[in-house]
Image (cartoon, rainbow, N blue to C red):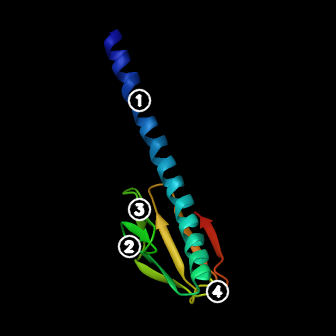
């Protein structure tokens, strides 16, 4: 009887711990993505040349730094963002990531390089 209770509690807690770690991994990915986005802008501005930020289903990279997309996050479509020598992007783009719990959308403003993040 005691063993059954211990096993039940262990399995119950391990499931919630796994869920917590997965949510932390997702939150860290978005923070790192935003940092890589801004870093790519600064790099383009500092070098005075275009920098491409490539988004694929499993990686985000600017050619110098890269970030792996966790398996629990799905990128709607692969694309390449180009930051000009002033750090601005050349198109009005929407980047959409989804997971089991939420959809995170980045709407990029043309020219300024700023973005609006929405979570639904």
Residue 61 position in % (x across, y down): 43, 71
Distance of mark 3 from mark 2, alpha carbons? 9 Å
Distance of mark 4 from mark 3, alpha carbons? 28 Å
Q: Which residue is mark 2?
A: 56
Residue sitting nearer the eye, 45 or 91: 45
Mark 4 and mark 3 lie on one chain; the one further toward the N terminus is: 3
Q: Residues within 10 Å of mark 3 (few under 14, many from 20)?
A: many
Q: Which mark is residue 12?
A: 1
Residue 80 position in % (x across, y down): 45, 82
Q: Is residue 27 left or right of residue 1?
A: right
Q: Which mark is residue 69?
A: 3
Q: Residues within 10 Å of mark 4 (few under 14, many from 20)?
A: some
**Quadrant of the image occupied by residue 46:** bottom right
Tally of numbered discs: 4
Q: Are marks 1 and 4 in contact (CB under 8 Å)?
A: no
Foreground disc of the pair 1, 2: 2
Q: Which residue is mark 4?
A: 86
Q: Which mark is residue 102?
A: none
Q: Is residue 76 left or right of residue 108?
A: left
């Amino acid at each position: 009887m005691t063993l059954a209770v211990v096993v039940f509690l262990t399995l119950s807690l391990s499931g919630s711990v796994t869920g917590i770690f997965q949510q932390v991994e997702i939150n860290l990915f978005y923070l790192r993505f935003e940092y890589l986005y801004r870093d790519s802008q600064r790099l383009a501005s500092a070098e005075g040349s275009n920098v491409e930020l490539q988004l694929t289903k499993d990686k985000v990279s600017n050619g110098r730094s890269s970030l792996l997309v966790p398996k629990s996050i799905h990128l709607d479509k692969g694309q390449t963002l180009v930051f000009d020598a002033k750090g601005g992007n050349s198109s009005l783009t929407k980047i959409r990531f989804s997971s089991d719990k939420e959809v995170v959308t980045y709407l990029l403003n043309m020219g300024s390089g700023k973005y609006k993040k929405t979570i639904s």
